[in-house]
Image: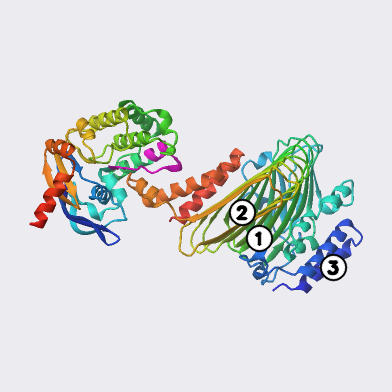
Amino acid sequence: MMNLSDFKDHYEELQAMTPESLIAQIRREGFQAYDKAGLPTKRNEEWKYTDVGRLLDNKYHFDDIQDASFRLEELEAIRLPGYQDANEIVFVNGRFAPALSNIRSAPGQLTVLPLETAAEGIYKGIVQEHLGCSNTYIKDGIHALNTSLINEGIFLYVPRGQELTHPLYIYHISDARRHNVLSQPRSLLCIEENTKVQLIEAFSTLGTEECFTNQVMEVVIRRNAVVEYYKIQNETANASQVSTTHFRQTGRSYLHAVTVTLNGGTIRNNMNVIMEAAGSEAHLFGLYVLNGHTHTDNHTLVDNMQPNCLSNELYKGILDDDATGVFNGKIIVRPDAQKTNAYQTNNNILLSDNAAVNTKPQLEIFADDVKCSHGCTVGQLDENALFYMRARGIPKPDAQQLLLKAFALDILDQVKPELLRGYVEQLITQRLAVNRK
Amino acid sequence: MLSIKNIHASIEDKPILKGIDLSIRAGEIHAIMGPNGSGKSTLASVLAGGEEYEVTEGSVTFLGKDLLEMSPEDRAREGLFLAFQYPVEIPGVSTTNFIKAAVNEKREYRGEEPLDAVNFMKLMKAKMAMLQIDQSLLSRSINEGFSGGEKKRNEIFQMAMLEPRLMILDEMDSGLDIDALRIVANGINKLRNENNAVLIITHYQRLLDYLQPDFVHVLYNGRIVRSGTKELALELEEHGYDFIKDEINLVASE
């Protein structure tokens, strides 16, 4: 298993390279936090249903990029549809791989730099101000571990007024063909005023050795920015991850986020939206279609700090076999955040006796003029609908598939880029066909 | 076409049908009437393969085959159609795609080629015209947000598309106003021919004014207690079910 000295050795190696840098300083704070908090156990309320410690029972390698045998040709199989027209950013084993990446937007429209480079150049101020703001919200050791071992992350900057015509595709590839891999990608995105950005993240693991991805992405969204974000998790049973996406709406802005989880080992998603500016709007959607022993834990946090914000969350799950799911939706409404509208819904269908879901709303409201609602359901397929369809000659498995697909449709419809929607729809259809074999 | 012999059925060990015999031949219209709770809808569901009921005794032969051995989907593909009393709303499944799947399932079962998009649309347009159904209804999700009348018309439309041999209409007239009732009834009349048959399950006489039944059966307490011609329905309409109940109870107490 991994123990403190493994992390410490690696941390010290990294620190020794550039001991005086800004990143080294941020790492140092991270390591202190990690040292203090340790890895979360199930006694930690935030981790009650997801045993992240168990994930680190394995011994992992911190890979050198040279060590990874992943090659450009292999990217072909991983690329998402529409890639020819996208900015592609590739991480291999948690480290930015510029040679595999393609930036198609013009230099004035988009800047992508290694995080360490950005932290020492003209973007130093931005990095200093914004990298690690997620620490205020997530104080556990797993998050601190990412910070303490920041290594070849990325800094992405969309300057004011740019409506990116090329979407951003971020691929997280873990090459676990030779040995267990611990990937810890870190990124900071700064999306300036009056911009429009589509951001798509996908995760892939090669090979059959154990793989654990502990990812943190922080996104700063300025005034009048419109951001669409999609996370596609379609991995293999040996691939587990903790994936933190921390949005800060520092100006009045619009966020639309969809998380689709289909395959993997243990998956924890932290989806945070900090509404720091009045009048911000965020729509969060999630779909998890799970079978086998996959465990998916979606933790959402919407923090309303200023008045007149709107957030809407809809997460839906279909669980078969021994799959388990968690939905924990936290909404904070601060005293200043009057006229907040915050809605939250989580619906689940269980297809087997062993599948289980824990769903929990968590509302902390400190203002008096707000509208907040939450609702959750856990049920089976509608027997009446099933019989109705069978009575028209549709075979039971087909009827089940149609009903499940209809259930998933609300979320699928939120995937706005046409090519991506088609791709996700195909994945879901395949999955449902497997589920109802 | 359909031969029901001494059917007993129960739900959660509570007997509902207590020995029903009924024979329906091609070209005939039968009506089953009876008070609430007599077992009318249970009979319809048992014939269509509803899994909540357990058939404890008896047999049903449909077109020479053992109906009770078949799954609901096979019964439909053999040509049995149940128009539901309460058609189910299924959000997210388009009515057109659903009907297309149903039509092609049936064709495949019979060893026929599936209809392509063009021919399917042709068939659909013809049936829509026949039943005065609006296209907009079919582009929506199955029955979602439909009025009572729209749901019933959608049932009849599906029936027209599937061209069943036996049409079972479970309380087709409930929730319909006079105009809608006429349209639905006219539709059913247009679908009739010498090769198919209709089993009407109803509370009231009024649907029977439009669909002249050859036989009327009164179901009471899980048994058919009277059978007759359409005049029996008029008699029931005039006197209510009480006179039948009184008769039965009288016989029972003797």
Give the residues drawn in magenta, as a range: B82-100
Measured as percent of width and height from the top left, residue A425 is found at: 54, 45
* Residue A151: numbered disc: none
* Residue A241: numbered disc: 1
Chain of the residue displaying label 2: A
The amino acid marked with disc number 1 is Gln
Identify the residue under disc 3. Answer: A12
Task: Please say if A294 is above or below A200.
Answer: below
Measured as percent of width and height from the top left, residue A315 is found at: 58, 50
Instruction: Report if the CB atoms under discs 1 and 3 are less than 8 Å apart.
Output: no
Q: Which numbered disc flags the more N-terminal residue, 1 or 3?
A: 3
Task: Please say if A175 is above or below B21.
Answer: below
Q: Which numbered disc flags the more N-terminal residue, 2 or 1?
A: 2
The residue positioned 69% from the left and 47% from the top of the image is: A368
Q: Is residue A266 magenta?
A: no
Is the residue at mark 2 from the same chain as the one at mark 3? Answer: yes
Identify the residue under disc 2. Answer: A233
Chain of the residue displaying label 1: A
Q: CA distance from mark 2 to mark 1?
A: 10 Å
| Residue A368 visible from this viewpoint | yes
